[in-house]
Image: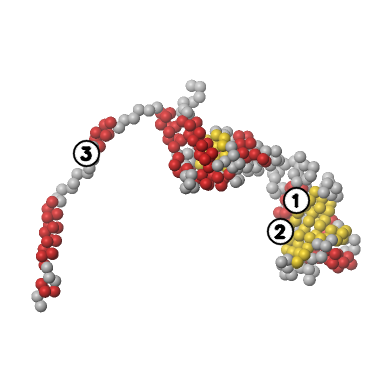
């Protein structure tokens, strides 16, 4: 039996071989990378700004919160962090368990005096620059527990607070508004020491 | 469902063993003298047929004239329970015997009562504040605490 009878159309194989040989012949040199417009762009790409503006922009654009959720406001914070309200829009979705990697403390909950030294220690361990957002009535003033023997009447007794967000608990929209207020506050910071 | 033992029936059984130890008995509870508390508790725990081997809870109430401490005892074997009460009238230094030697679970609960109500439990292995901090003044669950 002839081989052409079993596998008819030896022309196909011939054609494939021609195609490949032709492609090899065309492809002896690499094609240049498409970057001809970049030279011009690099020449134009200079931005003039102040050190304060660029630093403050960087600082406020990715505030990483530290874990400080002693009570129920934490649930509103979780909602804020989850997909519906999504604080990753502000570069904040990474909540740090280590205070050394965080720059914002969102104090979501009632603080007892027994817990207060730990919160103060966490705040002290955070690297400068750092900010505190008091979330909810208990964080602002102790809330309904203000006159209790065991509750700290406001976080500002132990650590400095930058922004106060009222509510019991505040809605996620309120927390987001508080965060945007903090952004505005950070935008006004200067690296030059005060009064010099 | 756990059956609540009749305090009156238990009181009738205990009267011979501990004359004068039981002050009062109700449909579901037993009020015992502070001095006899440990003996009676031990009897309730180890007597066959009662076997109240599990301490469900201890709680304390301030009635201003006296403090009342309630022990809810349960038998896991027979699935019945009994409420035993005891009172201390000395407001400045209320004292009761500790039942930690009978039920280890009493340890933290007696410490909590000591912390918040200011009742001392004699014989407790580690009687110190558990919820509040050392140096806190007063006992906040007392009615006269402000």
How far, Cα to Cα, is label 2 from label 3?
79 Å
Please tell me the numbered disc located at residue B113.
1
What secondary structure is marked by label 1? Answer: helix
How far, Cα to Cα, is label 1 from label 3?
81 Å
What chain is tagged by disc 1?
A: B
What secondary structure is marked by label 3? Answer: loop
Q: Is residue B21 shown above or below A51?
A: below
Read off the residue under disc 2.
Answer: B105
Residue A7 occupies quadrant: bottom left
B10 lies left or right of B127: right
What chain is tagged by disc 2?
A: B
Residue A67 occupies quadrant: top right
Q: Is residue B37 shown above or below A44?
A: below
x and y, in percent, of residue A61 in the image: 44, 37
x and y, in percent, of residue B19 in the image: 90, 63
What chain is tagged by disc 3?
A: A
Q: Is residue A48 shown above or below A32?
A: above
Mark 1 vs mark 2: which is more N-terminal? Answer: 2
Tell me whether marks 1 and 3 sit on the same chain: no
The answer to which of A186 and B114 lies nearer the viewer is: A186
């Amino acid at each position: 039996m002839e081989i052409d009878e079993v596998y008819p159309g030896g022309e196909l194989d011939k054609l494939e071989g021609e195609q490949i040989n032709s492609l090899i012949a065309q492809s002896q040199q690499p094609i240049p990378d498409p970057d001809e417009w970049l030279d011009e762009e690099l020449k134009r790409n200079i931005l003039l700004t102040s050190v304060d503006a660029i630093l403050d922009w960087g600082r406020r654009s990715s505030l990483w919160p530290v874990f400080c959720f002693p009570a129920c406001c934490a649930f509103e914070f979780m909602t804020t962090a989850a997909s519906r309200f999504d604080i990753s829009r502000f570069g904040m979705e990474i909540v740090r368990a280590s205070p050394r990697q965080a720059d914002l403390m969102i104090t979501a909950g009632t603080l007892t005096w027994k817990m207060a030294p730990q919160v103060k220690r966490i705040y002290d361990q955070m690297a400068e620059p750092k900010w505190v957002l008091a979330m909810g009535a208990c964080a602002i003033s102790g809330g309904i527990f203000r006159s209790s023997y065991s509750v700290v009447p406001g976080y500002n007794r132990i650590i400095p607070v930058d922004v106060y967000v009222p509510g019991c608990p505040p809605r996620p929209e309120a927390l987001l508004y508080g965060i945007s207020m903090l952004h505005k506050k950070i935008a006004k910071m200067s690296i030059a020491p005060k009064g010099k | 469902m756990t059956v609540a033992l009749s305090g009156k029936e238990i009181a009738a059984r205990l009267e011979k063993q501990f004359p004068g130890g039981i002050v009062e008995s109700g449909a579901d509870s037993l009020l015992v003298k502070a001095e006899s508390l440990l003996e009676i508790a031990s009897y309730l725990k180890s007597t066959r047929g009662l076997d109240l081997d599990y301490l469900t809870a201890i709680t304390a109430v301030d009635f201003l004239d006296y403090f009342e401490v309630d022990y809810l005892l349960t038998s896991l074997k027979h699935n019945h329970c009994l409420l035993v009460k005891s009172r201390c009238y000395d407001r400045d230094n209320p004292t009761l015997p500790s039942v930690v030697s009978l039920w280890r679970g009493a340890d933290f609960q007696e410490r909590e009562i000591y912390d918040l109500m200011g009742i001392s439990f004699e014989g407790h292995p580690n009687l110190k504040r558990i919820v509040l901090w050392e140096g806190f003044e007063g006992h906040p669950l007392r009615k006269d605490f402000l």
